[in-house]
Image (spheres, rainbow, N blue to C red):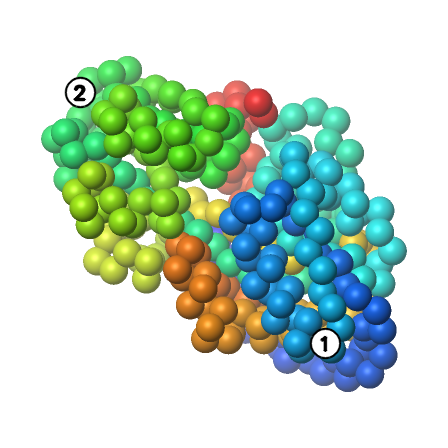
């Protein structure tokens, strides 16, 4: 599990976080730093701007957000070809390392072409159902799906998105036949669930929290390995009938491969310093996101674990990018 492997790395890797970066602090940066991320207005764009604003104050230089729409290929291409000097960084979620499983001829290697700086945030999904579905727990949902194979359907965004992969992991682990109904994005998928066009969805916390209070949706579980502070009292999928289940959206900061280890350490210290600020945590939390702030080695281990789990899901389910 991601969280278990992350925790196992924290003691030894945490020593790296605390290692001094005084040499870099004295002569870096001497010019603006660029953080390349997803399209403007996206969740990752919000995170990139929060962190970049904090870094600007810490470093005494402007940290500029460079938005690149489209697939991860575009943003990754910019950063993988940049000089490894700390002036071009990448802030990106899990599609960065899962895209090679979804399509052929991806022009970068997510492991070899980047140096992880820190796992910045994670966002679990909520397993939610339309109130008309007669289930109030994961076990009841699995039992109903097995009693009515092929009759229950679930909404997702485009192929390979986190809510799609969360549902596929659930389908495979639970051994149920539920049918995917794809939509162009999370918002139209949620609207379909509100209207009763579909039965269930693995939806981002920030998008569903208000509708749980109003009764428009019913939450059964959260997809993180441990209970989430975003939904006090809501059990995990793993503790509700599917041991070992975990699926979260991971986002992190990267530098081009070949960036000096001492500079990675310095950048890690500064980004984690921003993430530990109470006001930054509060803003992320308000968007349905939990801050992490890991050592580089722990983030690299979490990426490898996610690639192993979700890469197998993508391959076994025959998922291809849309």
Measure how far apart labels 1 and 2 are at the Cα level: 59 Å
Q: Position of residue 174 (x, y in %)?
A: 31, 32
Figure check: 4 above or below 175 = below
Q: Position of residue 114 (x, y in %)?
A: 74, 51
User: Nearer the N terminus, badge 1 or badge 2?
Assistant: 1
Q: Position of residue 168 (x, y in %)?
A: 41, 30
Q: Residues within 10 Å of mark 2 (few under 14, many from 20)?
A: few
> Residue reaching furthest left?
134
Residue 59 disc label? 1
* Residues marked 1 and 2 touching at CB (< 8 Å): no
Which numbered mark, 1 or 2, is in the foreground of this view?
A: 1
Residue at 40% x, 35% y is: 187
Figure check: 235 above or below 295 = above
Figure check: 262 above or below 169 = below
In the picture, the quarter occupied by the C terminus is: top right
For the residue pair 80 and 64, the one nearer the viewer reads as 64
Q: Quadrant of residue 63?
A: bottom right
Figure check: 170 above or below 221 = above
Element on which disc 2 rests: helix
Q: Position of residue 48 (x, y in %)?
A: 61, 57
Q: Which residue is mark 2?
A: 147
Residue at 21% x, 32% y is: 130
Residue at 85% x, 63% y is: 85
- Relative horizontal placement of residue 13, taking residue 79 as reference (left or right): left
- Relative horizontal placement of residue 109, taking residue 71 as reference (left or right): right
């Amino acid at each position: 599990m991601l969280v278990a492997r992350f925790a196992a790395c924290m003691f030894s890797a945490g020593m790296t976080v605390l290692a001094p970066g005084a040499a870099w602090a004295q002569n870096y940066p001497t010019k603006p730093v660029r953080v390349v991320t997803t399209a403007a207005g996206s969740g990752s764009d919000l995170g990139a701007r929060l962190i970049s604003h904090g870094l600007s104050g810490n470093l005494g230089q402007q940290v500029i957000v460079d938005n690149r729409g489209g697939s991860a290929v575009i943003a990754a291409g910019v950063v993988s070809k940049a000089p490894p000097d700390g002036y071009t960084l990448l802030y990106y979620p899990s599609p960065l390392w899962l895209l090679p499983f979804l399509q052929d001829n991806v022009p970068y290697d997510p492991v070899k072409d980047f140096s992880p700086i820190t796992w910045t945030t994670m966002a679990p999904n909520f397993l939610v159902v339309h109130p008309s579905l007669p289930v109030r727990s994961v076990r009841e949902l699995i039992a109903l799906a097995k009693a009515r194979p092929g009759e229950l359907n679930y909404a997702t965004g485009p192929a390979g998105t986190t809510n799609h992969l969360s549902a596929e992991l659930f389908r495979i682990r639970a051994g149920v036949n539920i049918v995917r109904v794809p939509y162009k994005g999370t918002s139209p998928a949620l609207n379909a669930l509100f209207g009763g066009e579909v039965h269930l969805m693995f939806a981002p916390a920030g998008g569903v929290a208000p509708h749980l209070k109003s009764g428009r949706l019913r939450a059964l579980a959260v997809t993180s390995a441990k209970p989430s502070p975003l939904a006090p009292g809501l059990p995990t999928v793993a503790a509700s009938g599917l041991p070992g289940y975990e699926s979260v959206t991971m986002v992190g900061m990267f530098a081009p491969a070949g960036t000096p280890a001492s500079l990675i350490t310095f950048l890690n210290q500064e980004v984690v310093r921003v993430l530990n600020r109470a006001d930054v945590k509060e803003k992320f939390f308000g968007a349905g996101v939990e801050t992490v702030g890991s050592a580089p080695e722990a983030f690299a281990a979490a990426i490898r674990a996610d690639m192993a789990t979700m890469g197998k899901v993508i391959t076994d389910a025959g998922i291809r990018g849309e």
